[in-house]
Amino acid sequence: MGASELTRPLAWIAVDWGSSNLRAWAMDAQHHVMASASSPRGMLSLTPAEYEAELLGIVDDWLPDSGQTPVMVCGMAGARQGWQEAAYLATPTRLDQLSRGAVMPPLADPRLRVYLLPGLSQTGSTNHDYDVMRGEETQLAGLLADTSRFSGLVCLPGTHAKWARLTDGAVTEFATYLTGELYQLLAHQSVLKHSVGQDDLQHDGCRQAFTQAVKATYQAPERFSQRLFGVRAQDLLANTLPSGDARSAVLAAHLSGLTIGLELAGACHELTPGENVTLIGNEALSHRYALALETLGIDTQRVDGDTAVLAGLTLAYQSTRQ
Amino acid sequence: MGASELTRPLAWIAVDWGSSNLRAWAMDAQHHVMASASSPRGMLSLTPAEYEAELLGIVDDWLPDSGQTPVMVCGMAGARQGWQEAAYLATPTRLDQLSRGAVMPPLADPRLRVYLLPGLSQTGSTNHDYDVMRGEETQLAGLLADTSRFSGLVCLPGTHAKWARLTDGAVTEFATYLTGELYQLLAHQSVLKHSVGQDDLQHDGCRQAFTQAVKATYQAPERFSQRLFGVRAQDLLANTLPSGDARSAVLAAHLSGLTIGLELAGACHELTPGENVTLIGNEALSHRYALALETLGIDTQRVDGDTAVLAGLTLAYQSTRQ
């Protein structure tokens, strides 16, 4: 879609550049999305020299003939192994000031000015461990679009699930849980791969297996490793399970509940009574976590992941103009 | 080594037939080992029709010209996907009666009489989960060689670590922890593979990282999943770690301590104060677990894995002759 096809003048471009893909949005002066484009080439498949061309490949059509368009980029493009390293900002970090840590890689094409936003780091202490995030800080910043002094506990489910404590619009503490990756490894590479299929939380048997596993592991996290083998043992011994695909679906839901239950056992002791959790992510994963949290009596509010990242990039763009 | 090369007459043959290998020992009438032989073909690489020939391939030389030699077999050869299924005996199980569950596969060669020993199963209840073991029950039986009414908590470290409560020579309860497999998956297939190398517990830095991780996870098992990512975050951020191979060794020891600490958090709450743990296994792994348990103030006694399996097979052989 050429610049002449954008319905209003291009003000800036929003970019989320992850490990495995690139997504860009053409933004107008009111920070509304006019168009979007994407490419499957993420940090893992690009050398530093290839980033500029890859970006132009999907946004070139949007660019006006003259002038320089700001591009706000969050995600792994700013990692050490990315385009250019935007060093972590150490917590506590005000989310309306991420752009202060942005770096601007040199470009051949004069029509763009690229800002690579920093991630966040946390130094280890007695209270919390070393930790890092890159990309999620921008989604967290998106919460400030509605509530500039946002306070609360936020969870971003995913391969490396993040939990962040926000206080007056700053990240004061955060933790990463390997939950998603752990589930994938166990379901596809471990002895459990013979037993675990594809779950469906709409299905009663799956939902029940999931919520029971969440509750049991939340109450006794030390039995997690034992319960993992129990998935296999149940498959071999239990005659109360359905058979075939229904069986492997129930066992998949059970395994999912074990891994998420372990994460919640670690993350939720931080909650003050009556405090809720804000979930940022895609529909399916947020629904899964909301079900788990509600099983434990914890209320949730959900924010769409893409909505959050665009709001966060908008905040960063606005702060570069101050 | 032919039968004429055995120093005394062959009384029976002991066999441990696992997933990945076959080991056999020529036993005299006093149950001493006269010779041993092995093959790399275990359950995973054999069809039922191939077992007899594979066994004869390594024991043929020991067999006298006439008569029938009993062969006591423990391990995966008796699994559903093995030679012939020797169905699990359900707990509680007296370890001096394993041979009652033995099956005798039909053989073409009249010089052998093969007993495939059963494994153990445990039905799920409010107190414990569904669980299975196959092969370890024979090592546990080996404890009865010295103490026929053995009582105590026993740990067999490994890919799927087993913990068993023995009461008066019977297994009353047991649990499997996926610890070894979890470590392998995390160290070699997850995001941590970039950080984790080969540890060496003789090295002070490794030993310290290991014992600290054991203690921290034992005290707070709910933080396990978070601490996993911490291995990566530390590698990226911590400037107190050594560099190069020493760094990846320390991080490997740290990861090992996390997974074993989680297992101990689950397994050791069963201990009465002052009770010790009997470890059965190979030298290196038993040493690692002993170090972990002693870090938590729990005394251990160690029994060599091969010694235990031979003693258990001997007990089973003796019970077939009653």
Image (cartoon, coloured by chain):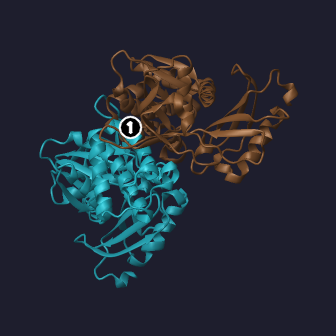
Chain colours: A brown, B cyan
Q: Position of residue A284 (x, y in %)?
A: 58, 25
* Image side of residue B191 versus residue B320, left or right: right
Please say if A234 is above or below A84: above
**Is residue A226 at least partly visible in the picture?**
yes
* Image side of residue B58 versus residue A311, left or right: left
Foreground of the two, B24 or B301: B301
Dot 1: chain letter? A
* Image side of residue B139 versus residue B160, left or right: left
Rendered image quadrant of residue A37: top right
Q: Position of residue A239 (x, y in %)?
A: 45, 31
Rendered image quadrant of residue A70: top right
Foreground of the two, B91 or A199: A199
Local secondary structure at mark 1: helix
Q: Position of residue B272 (x, y in %)?
A: 15, 41
Q: Which residue is mark 1?
A: A227
- At x 27%, y 53%, the residue is B211
**Quadrant (top left, top right, bottom left, bottom right) of the N terminus of chain B:** bottom left
**Quadrant (top left, top right, bottom left, bottom right) of the C terminus of chain B:** bottom left
Q: Amino acid at mark 1?
A: Arg
- At x 16%, y 53%, the residue is B299
| Number of numbered callouts drawn | 1
Foreground of the two, B149 or B268: B268
Q: Position of residue B105 (x, y in %)?
A: 45, 56
Foreground of the two, B207 or A26: A26
